[in-house]
Amino acid sequence: MKSVPSPSKSPTIASSGIQLRPEIPLCQTDLPLDWYQAEFKPYAEEYLALPDRKPGTIFPWLDRYVIPAQEHFGDSLLLLAHFYMGGEIVKIVERYGGKVADSYQLALQAARNPEKKVLVESAVHFMAETIATLAADDQTVWITNPKAGCTMEMLAKDWMVLPAAEQLIERYGSKLAVVAYMNTGGRVKALAGRTNGAVCTSSNAHLVCDALRKEGKTIFFVPDHHLGRNTAWKLGMDLARVVAFPEPKLWIQNPRLATLPGGLEALDRAEMILWGSYCGVHTIFSKAMVDWWHARGWKVLVHPESPLEAVQAADGAGSTDYLWKAVMNAKAGEKLVIGTEGHFVRNAREQARQRGADIVHLADIPDPKFQGGGCGCATMSRNDPPHLAGMLDLLRKGKAPEINRVLAGDVVDEQTAARERLDVNERATLVKDAKKALERMIAITEAAR
């Protein structure tokens, strides 16, 4: 098994290019006080009492907590955030020297920065867990809000997926390989490792699936059926040989392979089998939305978690990194429509405006028949300035809540924050299997650079 590539082989995360302007309020909506853990409420009370949300107000308050923590931990501290976080966290993390990236780059940060011993992530739990899976024993990973989750991952918990995987493995044996999208928990990633499959992200799904196809594998793609179908189309697969599970809540009511569309005969012909989960933000995009903007002279780019018809109609599709680069490279006068998470597009619009380009959200159409879109990811937005301030201050004082510590195999209830943690031996087995799947993804991706 290949090891994680060294930092010299792959570039470090570059600055996002976000420019802060003191007169522009940071865009994330305040969370109610009762949404905070008890240890974080004092920080939330201070933040909610601030007179406004402009950088000139927020940063002096944050400095009181972030700078002492940075001085305490020195170069051993690393702050991380995903592009989809609310505007405050994305800008704040970079302002304090942290890194903002897509899920692939975030996953590698512990392994590529062994000198960083305390990694604090403002993103969703599965991302922090992936970082922890690849971390060394002397590195600790913390999440600012353990209830920050992902609707797609919530519909692909191991107890939902395993009954399907076990039946598929019984029927197809070693011919079956699980490809676990990054938006899964460690227990599903470990399943990918046990079947000699791999993890993937939206930026490398086609590379991973193509490599497994060349080995003659039948791919069980978990969890996003839109990304899976788009990947099959990108690779030129016969879509008649792509079989999708029903919506997970329906499947678990009668979990038998014979109930799938086309039954066992369709499964036996399949090149790719798709779990039935999806992203609630991206699944609302449609070809009609793309066509509406095209008719008015706009260029449209979408995320590949969108339905196939929208991807086929768009001018391009790609990961958050792909979309962000398109925004930051937009020329003055360019008119660009982005189909992805709302906080991302609001940040993109603000940055593009400073370059003389226009950015709009795909679902922001002034027509009554296009309603209900353009939202941000509510679960990701559970990370905010009070959570970051509190996490760093409590870590500095040695009082960080254990629930905020992330270990491989942890499963956290996104509503109650109740956690199920594996014992030491179970976790060691999971790490071995999940690392196998992650390292295969990394090897495939780096070989294609």
Image (cartoon, rainbow, N blue to C red):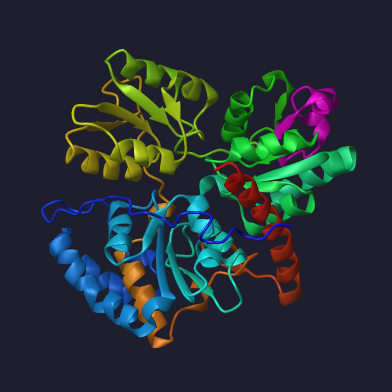
Residue at screen point 18% across, 38% down: 355
Residue 219 is situated, as x and y percent measured from the top left of the image, at 74, 37
Q: Which residues are magenta?
A: 248-275
Residue 332 is situated, as x and y percent measured from the top left of the image, at 19, 31
Image: 33 above or below 318: below
Q: Quadrant of residue 179?
A: top right
Residue 41 is situated, as x and y percent measured from the top left of the image, at 33, 73
Q: Quadrant of residue 6?
A: bottom right
- Residue at the far top: name it: 295
Q: Which quadrant is home to the N terminus?
A: bottom right
Judged left or right of residue 207, residue 102 is: left
Residue at screen point 38% across, 68% down: 36
Q: Quadrant of residue 294?
A: top left
Query: Is residue 440 shown in magenta?
Result: no
Residue at screen point 78% across, 22% down: 262
Residue 237 is situated, as x and y percent measured from the top left of the image, at 68, 23
Residue 362 visible: yes
Label count reads 0
